[in-house]
């Protein structure tokens, strides 16, 4: 009989949720959510982008991105503006306040990564990443 407790898909999801919840808890005292941190990270790394591009990078629905961007704009972390040639496209970029906040909080991402990978060798991490890549490959071909 199928056993959910030994199912790698269930185990992976359980760990991913715990990682997300733990990182979110660590960021809340700074007044930023994990999702906001992630959006600001991509905007800092890649610069101005459309809301759709941000949705794709974060692997979230465009409707979720709209709500995220609304909140971040209200908090003064980002600005948005329409494309001058195609008014359907909305671009976003970090404000100085947003750049300062994510630069202050980047170390929290590193701390979270170190916390989660304690006692795991670099070799084990590489194997884990390869296995995850294979899972993704398998699922993209479904």
Image (cartoon, rainbow, N blue to C red):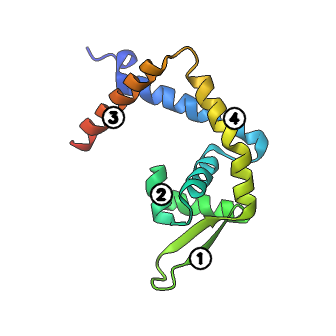
Q: In the rendered image, which quarter is residue 123 located in? A: top left
Q: Residue at x 49, y 17 (%)?
A: 121
Query: Considering only order in the chain, which callout, 3 or 1, is on the residue closer to the N terminus?
Result: 1
* Frontmost residue, 100 versus 51: 100
Q: Residues within 10 Å of mark 4 (few under 14, many from 20)?
A: some
Q: Residue at x 36, y 20 (%)?
A: 4
x and y, in percent, of residue 46 in the image: 53, 58
Q: Residues within 10 Å of mark 2 (few under 14, many from 20)?
A: some
Residue 109, numbered circle: none
CB of mark 1 within 8 Å of CB of mark 3? Answer: no
Residue identified by numbered label 2: 55
Residue identified by numbered label 4: 25
Q: Is residue 75 visible?
A: no
Distance from disc 1 to disc 2, alpha carbons, whole Å, reads 16 Å
* Frontmost residue, 54 versus 68: 54
Query: Considering only order in the chain, which callout, 2 or 3, is on the residue closer to the N terminus?
Result: 2
Distance from disc 1 to disc 3, alpha carbons, whole Å, reads 36 Å
Query: Considering only order in the chain, which callout, 3 or 4, is on the residue closer to the N terminus?
Result: 4
Q: Is residue 57 visible?
A: yes
Q: Secondary structure at mark 2?
A: helix
Q: Nearer the viewer, mark 3 or mark 2?
A: 3
Residue 81, numbered circle: 1
Query: Considering only order in the chain, which callout, 4 or 1, is on the residue closer to the N terminus?
Result: 4
């Amino acid at each position: 009989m199928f056993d959910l407790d030994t199912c790698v898909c269930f185990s992976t999801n359980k760990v991913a949720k715990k990682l997300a919840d733990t990182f979110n808890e660590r960021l809340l005292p700074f007044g930023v959510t994990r999702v906001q941190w992630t959006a600001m990270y991509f905007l800092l790394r890649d610069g101005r982008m459309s809301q759709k591009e941000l949705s794709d990078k974060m692997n979230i629905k465009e409707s979720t991105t709209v709500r995220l961007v609304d909140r971040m704009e209200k908090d003064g972390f980002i600005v948005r503006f329409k494309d001058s040639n195609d008014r359907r496209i909305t671009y976003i970029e970090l404000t100085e306040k947003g750049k300062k906040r994510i630069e202050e909080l980047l170390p929290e991402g590193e701390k979270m990564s170190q916390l989660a990978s304690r006692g795991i060798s670099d070799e084990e991490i590489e194997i884990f990443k390869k296995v995850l890549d294979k899972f993704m490959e398998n699922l993209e071909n479904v």
